[in-house]
Image (spheres, rainbow, N blue to C red):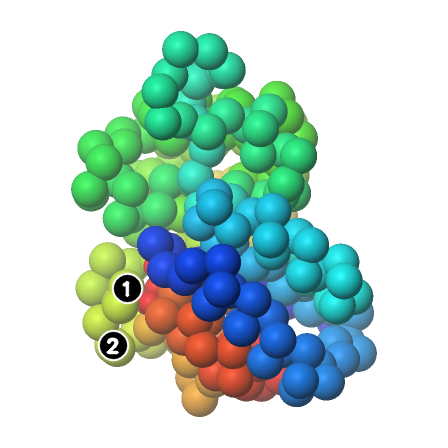
Amino acid sequence: MKKIFIIANWKSNKTIKEADAWFLSIQDSGLRIENVNKEIIICPSFTLLSEGGLKVKSQELRFKIGAQNISQYEEGAYTGEVSGRQIKELAEFAVIGHSERRDNFAETDKIVGKKIDQAFKYELIPIICISNIEQVKNLKSKISNGKIIIAYEPLFAIGSGSPDTPENADRMCQEIKSILGEVPALYGGSVNKDNIKNFTKMLNIDGALVGKASLDPLEFLGIINNA
Ligand code: PGA
C-alpha cells in the first residue's frame, strides 16, 4: 500500500491564538491516525513553528512540522531571512518554490536551487512545488543525493475552487517520476475533503498539498480521513 502525504500549507494565516484553537479542535475530534501509511505535515508561518511543534508534542499527534520557505543564504547579514540552520531547530520539512513565492517574490529556478542546497545542508526535507515540467527538468541535477517531495500545483487550480482533473494530475505525477525517479509526487490546488480521494486513488499521486481547506480543522480532518 502506498504512503499518502497530506500537507497543510497555512500560507500567511493564523495568529498563535488561532493556531492554538485549530490544534484544540483536532484534539477534541479524538483523531487517531491508525493508518501508518499516512504522513501529515503542517506548514505554518515561521511565527507558529515553535507553537505548532509544542502542540504536536503535547497532544501526541502523529503530525510533523514544516516551514513554508527557507532562505537561499547561510546565516549572516541577511535581514529578515530565516536560514535552514534556524528552521532545523523547529521543523523537519521546508516548502520550496511555491508559485506564490515564484510570482510575488521573484523566485527563479536558480534561487529555488540554492534553497534546496540549504535544505539538504541542514537535513530538512524539501517539499518542492512545480507547476510545469520544465521546472522538474531543472531540478534533475539538484536532487540526486537527498530525500525530497514534489508537489505538482497548476497555477489555475491554486485557490480557485477549480482543481485539475485527477487524470491530468496523475499524468504529471507519472512524468515527474519518470524524470526524477521514485519520489513522492503530490497534487495541490483546490483540494478539499470531497475531492481528495479522486486524487489519492490515482496510481502515481502520493498525496496532496492543501491550502485553504487546511485552515479549517474539521475540513482538514475530513481530508485526512478520506484520503
Ligand atoms: P489551495 O492552495 O488548496 O488553497 O488551492 C494550494 C497551495 O497553494 O498549496
Q: Is mark 1 within 8 Å of ligand 1?
A: yes
Task: Examine the image and state in which quarter residue 207 appears.
Answer: bottom right
Placement of the N terminus among the 4 image quadrants: bottom right
Q: Is residue 109 above or below residue 218?
A: above
Pointers 1 and 2 in contact (CB under 8 A)?
Answer: no
- State whether residue 74 appears in this view: yes
Q: Which residue is mark 2?
A: 162
Q: Is residue 35 above or below residue 95?
A: below
Q: Amino acid at mark 1?
A: Ile
Q: Quick one: which residue is furthest to the front in this view?
A: 17
Q: Is residue 156 left or right of residue 201?
A: left
Q: Residue at x 62, y 75 (%)?
A: 24
Q: Is residue 52 left or right of residue 14?
A: right
Label 2 element class:
loop
- Across and down, in percent, residue 123 comes to 66, 30
Q: Which residue is mark 1?
A: 158
Q: Residue at x 75, y 68 (%)?
A: 59
Q: Amino acid at mark 2?
A: Ser
Q: Is mark 2 within 8 Å of ligand 1?
A: no
187, 98: nearer the viewer = 98
